[in-house]
Amino acid sequence: MTLEKKHSVIEANNLTIGYQSKKKTTVVADGINFSIYKGELIGLVGANGIGKSTLLRTIAGMQPVIDGIIYIDNIPLKKYHSLQLANQLSIVLTEAPASRNLTVLELVSLGRQPYTNWVGKLSEKDKETIHSALQNTETETLAHQKCFEISDGQLQRVMIARALAQDTPLILLDEPTTHLDMYHRAYVLKLLKTLASDSGKTILFSTHEIDLAIQLSDKMMVMTPETIHFNTSKKLIEAGCFESLFPKETIQFNPETGRFSIK
């Protein structure tokens, strides 16, 4: 009896990321290899400026791959047209949207654009998906408010709702807990965990909430100046990967509790 090969939702082979111009290429990180599967929640951590946002933007096709290959659903990223890619992945960035004059409902509804007809008319299925996204992020009471009228934390949850409304198998989030209080930081990360485990979404998120990510993530990607470690939290703790994230004279990691503390 042969075991069925697990199907990766996203895979990177010898990936190099960074920035290119006519004059030079700036490499941010290289030698990146990983395979992420359906229903997995992956936490991406590292110090500021290490390249977390660059990696997410590269995966999303927002900036070019310098070297190596990214596969989405076993197809090279470069072979996707923009509309095809919008059916495969959604992304939530830290920047506030330019369309803050829209209502919350209008902004979340934009997540259905890859599926609506040429006039953008919403079907009953579209409306149900939008309502579910608002419910899951506790933003349904904000539906008719303008986005400029709500707090930064509320807007962050609205942007996650928009990604949920897009209903893609892969969701990328760049620091989704920015501007949130302690309760909503935990709430959002638990929501991501539920979406991955119950809805089969594959979710890759960058975060500074390393303690929470260790508790909730199926696997983690730890970016350091030397390399990128990718494994379960338990394996990464055993390998001492978290101790190298910050200067030891300032912040200490306790492998027994999986938490950081100030020395």
Image (spheres, helix red, strand yellow):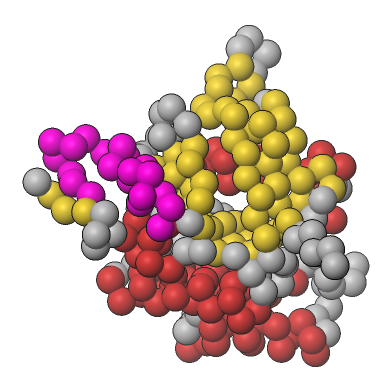
Q: How many marks?
A: 0
Residue 238 forms part of the magenta stretch: yes
Please give left or right for residue 16 compared with residue 127 in the image: left
With respect to residue 106, does 58 lie above or below? above
Instruction: Give x and y (percent) for residue 218.
Output: 51, 64
Q: Quadrant of the N terminus?
A: bottom right
Residue located 47% across and 64% down the image: 217
Q: Which residues are magenta?
A: 234-253
With respect to residue 253, does 18 lie above or below? above
Q: Nearer the viewer, residue 171 or 153?
A: 171
Please give left or right for residue 57 compared with residue 1 in the image: left
Query: Which image quadrant for residue 110?
Result: bottom right
Please give left or right for residue 52 compared with residue 57 in the image: left
Residue located 74% across and 35% down the image: 69
Query: Which image quadrant for residue 180?
Result: bottom left
Instruction: Give x and y (percent) for residue 222.
Output: 44, 44
Q: Nearer the viewer, residue 260 or 139?
A: 260
